[in-house]
Amino acid sequence: MYLIVGLGNPGNRYQQTRHNIGFMVLEAIAARWAVDIKQKSFEALWNRGKVAGANVLLAMPQTYMNLSGNAVRSLQAYFKVDTGNVIVIHDDLDLPFGAMRLKAGGGDAGHKGLKSIVTCLGSADFTRVRMGIGKPADRTPVEDYVLQKFNPGESARLREIIQSASDAAADIIQSGLQQAMAKHHTKNISNLKKEDG
């Protein structure tokens, strides 16, 4: 079984903000694979279903970002999911908007949601789907920037970006991380080059 977690903050105030792109991707996965994520327990909205033929749990922690690990640990422990089968989808300031990178393990790079998960699981050996949101171009503090809504230019591209991340999560399950990385990293590098040129 896999546990796919989208990170974000609950409540209307945070909808469509950069920090909530993990929630957006998780909702797209749930819609695509017809999983109704309305169970409320384990400090999360979650449900069981199938993605790419595999049994999965889809979850959105409802603890606010900084305590995301509480929900992840509760679900992982109760359903006995191997840490290597945990996939966390989250925003990443170190990647330009529209870029996506897949990786297993590593540090938290200052992301408090990831830090909470590593602390609660006692391991960093889970898979990450890193969604680029870029850094503020002006002097906006990072704490404010991540809680801002996407600007109109970004919003126009969101649907395509979220769909790509949904595809990547399914490919991790179906083909393994290495093949998913080869497929999706090449695609995103190509897109970035076109935009930069």
Image (tube, rainbow, N blue to C red):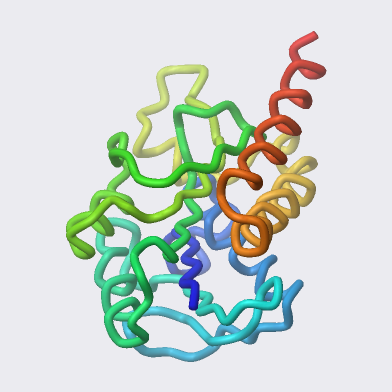
- Measured as percent of width and height from the top left, residue 21 is found at 56, 52
Going 49% across and 91% down the picture, which residue do you hit? Answer: 39
Q: Is residue 64 above or below residue 195?
A: below
What is the number of callouts on the image? Answer: 0
The quarter of the image holding the C terminus is: top right
Q: Is residue 68 left or right of residue 30?
A: left
> Quick one: 75 or 143, which is closer to the camera?
75
* Residue 126 to residue 46: above or below: above
The image position of residue 127, as x and y in percent, is 44, 53
Q: Residue at x 70, y 37 (%)?
A: 154
Front residue (pair 146, 187): 187
Which residue appears at 57% of the width and 83% of the height? Answer: 37
Above or below for 73 versus 48: above
Q: Residue at x 71, y 30 (%)?
A: 186
Q: Is residue 21 above or below residue 64?
A: above
Residue 97: percent from left, percent from top: 62, 32
The foreground one among 58 and 51 is 51
Q: Quadrant of residue 80?
A: bottom left
Residue 147 appears at what percent x and percent y?
A: 45, 46
Compared across the picture, whether 21 is left or right of 153 comes to left
Within the image, what quadrant is residue 105 found in? Answer: top left
124 sits left or right of 173 in the view: left
Q: Tell whether 60 sits left or right of 119.
A: right
